[in-house]
Amino acid sequence: MQRKISFIWFIIVSSIVGILFSISIILFPFSPIIPLIIAPATIVVPQQIIATLPVRLQIPKIHIDAFVEYLGLTPSGAMDVPAGPDDVAWFDLGPRPGSTGAAVIAGHEGWKDNTPAVFDNLYKLKKGDTVTIEDGTGSTTVFVVQKTQIFGEADNSATVFDSSDGGIHLNLITCEGIWNPATKSYSGRLVVFTDKI
């Protein structure tokens, strides 16, 4: 008799637990259990990606050792630029330096009040000069200069941001030409095209 009663209580308790669990899923579909399950995918993976992002740009020939900011587009749709004269900015809507495609890093030239800017001497780079990117893990990727090119405001600059040859490229860009006070911009852009060694 005791065994029969225990079995009945087991069925009743199991049914109540099942009903309560079902109700909790319906009423609280995003319960605290879910973040515990997905935490490794949302926390660990981004940290690994962040570690491989660029942190420093080094160009021995023109004595550059600059911190890398991450920037996208301005509200007008142009590539954004670093806030100050000393840092460079990686265009983070494109590939990371060292990944397949054309990564782009911008820096200022001709800062106001004759303050030195990071890419003042970018024009001095020649084919064969080296450019190094360091990531958050301390790993470095070395690129070699292939060519320099000046783009006017109306020129098609798609080749700066896009590459379909399957290679690994890093393109450095800065201002060039005449300053226009009305548009607060220079008349052209100097681009140094580099390939991974």
Image (cartoon, grey):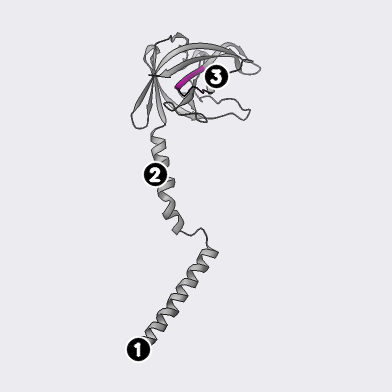
Residue 79, position as x, y percentages in the image: 56, 25
Count residues near mark 1 (Cα–Cα under 10 Å), then give few for <14, some for 14-19, many for 20+: few
In the foreground, 13 or 164: 164
Q: Is residue 108 left or right of residue 41?
A: right
How far apart, in angstroms, are the residues tagged by discs 3 and 1? 83 Å
Residue 130, position as x, y percentages in the image: 38, 15
Mark 2 or mark 1: whose residue is earlier in sequence? 1
> At x 43% / y 26%, what residue is drawn?
97
Mark 3 or mark 1: whose residue is earlier in sequence? 1
Quadrant of the rendered image containing residue 151: top right
Q: Quadrant of the N terminus?
A: bottom left
Q: Which mark is residue 2?
A: 1
Mark 3 or mark 2: whose residue is earlier in sequence? 2
Q: On screen, 22 above or below 111?
A: below
In the foreground, 45 or 60: 45
In the foreground, 75 or 163: 163
Q: Amino acid at mark 1?
A: Gln
Q: Which mark is residue 159?
A: 3
Q: Which residue is mark 2?
A: 44
- Please, what secondary structure does the residue beneath circle 3 have? helix
Q: Amino acid at mark 2?
A: Val
Quadrant of the rendered image containing residue 65: top left
- Please, what secondary structure does the residue beneath circle 1 have? helix
